[in-house]
Image (cartoon, grey):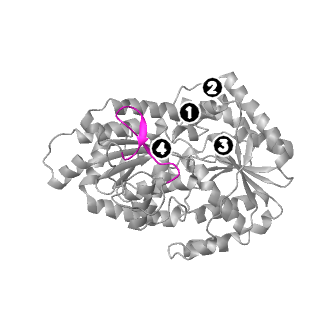
Amino acid sequence: MTIELVEIPGGPSLDEYATSMLLTDAVEDLRATVGPLVPRLAGRTVWMVNSTARGGGVAEMLPRVVGVLNELGVATKWAVIGTKKLAFFDLTKRMHNLIHGAGNPALSPADHALYDEVSTDLAGEFQGWLGPRDVLFIHDPQPAGMGAKVKDALGLRGVWRCHIGLDRDLPQTRVAWGLLEPYVTRYERAVFTAAEYVPAVLKDRATLIRPALDPFGYKNREFSVSELVSILVSAGLARAEGAVLPAPFSRRAERLQPDGTFRVATEPDDLGILFRPTITQISRWDRLKGWKPLLDGFVELKQSGPRAEEPALRQAIAEARLLMGGPEPAAVADDPEAKQVLEELRATFLALPAEIQRDVALLSLPMSSHRENQLMVSALQYGSTIVVQNSVQEGFGLTVTEAMWKGTPLVVSSACGIRQQIRPGVDGTMVRDANDPSQIAAALRSALADPAGRVRMARNARRRVRDEFLIFNQVKQNVKLLAELVG
């Protein structure tokens, strides 16, 4: 079997969400809007399909989206595709980069044939799972071809949800859309995060729905100070000064050491999250996340030399530490580039001067436990002075949304997906060019120099997430779309 049905973990009910004063109105609006629409979907199963159950924003969103849909009365299942032809995921990673405007703008006839061949194989397997009135909700390029072939074979209705895109028309994007066009144009509706992402061939069927987060998820729930410290210690991200009641996590975070190996994250010294100005980026190991320019910008900040600055700012820069964290690469099955990107960062880290190397921590976060991984990420975001998302291109960037919800100040790039969330100077500090280390250094300096401004923007960001980027709004839009599709 190369397609797997994902078991949806239990989660909070809508009644439990509604006990929070921040969420009561959103839950009531969701129920009032979708209640009259749910009967239209009776007798059908909605199939959410993507390419991985772990790692990345789509895999994180789907469990609660599927759970809430089922609670509302919309029968929904989640399936994940795979293939023994590993070159397929190399190809779809290249397509991902091309849609973001990166890479060699060429796909060969062999690439087209491979995509079609794997899509045909998957469609043959998936057809046996489906009923005659089911509805497909296919996510991103990897399963798009399979879904189109299933639609043709069984006459089903379907939505293709594209979570990536670029706000420019380039040779790279035209090549990628050229491969996808024969498949994605077979869906009745296509969903995008931003209007700028919609290719011309899909403008007649496009709908805009922004991603969202689950406010009660492990990654987004609020912590007390004692809970935060406990998680950091249990995850191996902080040293314990005494006995700590919670048991250590099943696997702890690891940190790149000066000898080039990964070992416990509190060696050779404590990360200092609770005591030092901490600048943190957490993402997949992907060049489009702007890792290398961020590291270079931090080095420039540290080496900028004496300035006529307030003593507090000079001390903040001197004590600042950069944390760069991502999933252990082997755990992200659909991203074969991850190991290569991490190796490049490893080489850059090992070439740093010793005094800078001590202030940079490259973290590998284990993925064996979904709960523990999310708690690690959440604690890092909560405990940081500044969260950075320096993406060169970004479909949306839930890591931004997560930090906004936590009220952690942000320094972000101007990638189109991030611009859907952050208003420069209102919700966070924005870097115009994510590839320019000098701009990154200046933005970090500006944020460190203005504690009051950081607090003001962080409060604005939290309100913005409450109003626009929570799961209830996303589910409401999905149900409206599905009801129209079958209506």
3 or 4: tag closer to the N-terminus: 3
The span from disc 2 to disc 4 (Cα, nearest Å) is 29 Å
2 or 1: tag closer to the N-terminus: 1
3 or 1: tag closer to the N-terminus: 3
- Whether pointer 2 and pointer 1 mark residues with C-beta atoms closer than 8 Å, the reply is yes
- Whether pointer 2 and pointer 4 mark residues with C-beta atoms closer than 8 Å, the reply is no
Q: Nearer the viewer, mark 2 or mark 3?
A: 3
The span from disc 1 to disc 4 (Cα, nearest Å) is 22 Å
- Left-right relation of 154 to 273: right
- Given the image, on which type of amino acid does mark 3 rest? Ser
2 or 4: tag closer to the N-terminus: 2
Identify the mark at residue 326; answer none if there is no mark: 4
Residue hosting label 2: 107
- The stretch in magenta equals 249-266
Q: Secondary structure at mark 4?
A: strand
Q: Quick one: label 4, few (<14), some, or many (20+) residues within 10 Å?
A: many
Asked whether 251 falls inside the magenta stretch, the response is yes
